[in-house]
Image (cartoon, rainbow, N blue to C red):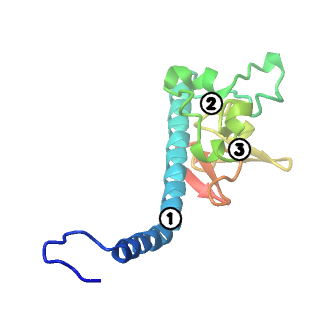
Amino acid sequence: MKRFPNDQGFTMLELLMVIGIIACLAGLLLPTIAAMRQKADSVACLSNLRQIGIAAQLYAGEHDQTMPVIEPWPSEPVYSASDGAQNLLDVLKPYGVTAATLRCRSDISGPNYYVKEKSSYEWCPMANGQNVHSAKMVWAGNVASVTLSQLLVAFDYSDVHNHASNVLFGDCHVASGN
C-alpha cells in the first residue's frame, strides 16, 4: 500500500494492533482490580465494626459501664420481651450508628444478611450486659475473667472476606479471623 506524504491516518492493521494490546493489558489488570475492590470492601466493613464498637463504649459510659443487650438474630429472636433486647440500630442509633454503618458491601453482594437481619454484623451474646471493667466469659460451663481486648462484641454474619470474618472486640479493635 502506497502512502502519500500528507496522509495522517492509521491503517486498519495499526488500529487492530493497538486495540489488541489494550485488550491484553485490560485482561491482565482485571483480576488485580477485582482483588483491590474486595480488599477495599473488607476495610470498609472493618471501619463499620469499629464504629459499632465505639458506639457500644459510649452506650456503656452512659449506662453504668454496662454493655447493651442486643438481639443477635432479630429475624429469629432468642431473647424474650422481658430481657429488654433490641436490635443493633435501635440501641446504638443515639451514639452515631446508622443503617449505612450496619451495611457491609461484601455481605450485600454475597449472602445479604442485611436484608434478613437489618445488619451485616451479628452482635455476640457474650457481650450482652457485660460490665466493661469486669467482663467474664462463660465457655463450656467455665467462667473466666477476660479483658476487653479478649471480649467478642460483634462480627460478620458470614465469612465474606476471602473466607474470613471480621471480629470486633470490647476495646474497639477489629481483627480479621478465619
How many neighbours does mark 2 have within 10 angstroms: few (below 14), some (14-19), or many (20 or more)?
A: many
Q: CA distance from mark 3 to mark 1?
A: 28 Å
Residue 148, position as x, y percentages in the image: 58, 44
Residue 23, position as x, y percentages in the image: 46, 69
Residue 39, position as x, y percentages in the image: 52, 57
How many neighbours does mark 3 have within 10 angstroms: few (below 14), some (14-19), or many (20 or more)?
A: many
Q: Amino acid at mark 2?
A: Met
Left or right side of 165 for 47: left
Front: mark 3 or 2: 3
Q: CA distance from mark 2 to mark 1?
A: 44 Å
In this view of the protein, can residue 153 be seen by the observer? no
Q: Amino acid at mark 3?
A: Tyr
Q: Tell me where residue 157 sits by quadrant.
A: top right
Front: mark 3 or 1: 1
In this view of the protein, can residue 85 be seen by the observer? yes
Q: Nearer the viewer, residue 38 or 73?
A: 38
> Label 2 near label 3: C-beta < 8 Å?
no
Residue 36, position as x, y percentages in the image: 48, 60
Q: Which mark is residue 90?
A: none
Q: Nearer the viewer, residue 123 or 27?
A: 27
Ranked by sequence position, the earlier of labels 3 and 1 is 1
Q: Nearer the viewer, residue 33 or 91?
A: 33
68 in relation to 105, above or below: above
- Element type at mark 3: loop
Q: Residue at x 24, y 69 (%)?
A: 9
- Element type at mark 1: helix
Q: Tell me where residue 88 sits by quadrant.
A: top right
Q: Residue at x 49, y 44 (%)?
A: 47
Query: Which residue has dot 1 on it?
Result: 30
Query: Which residue has dot 2 on it?
Result: 67
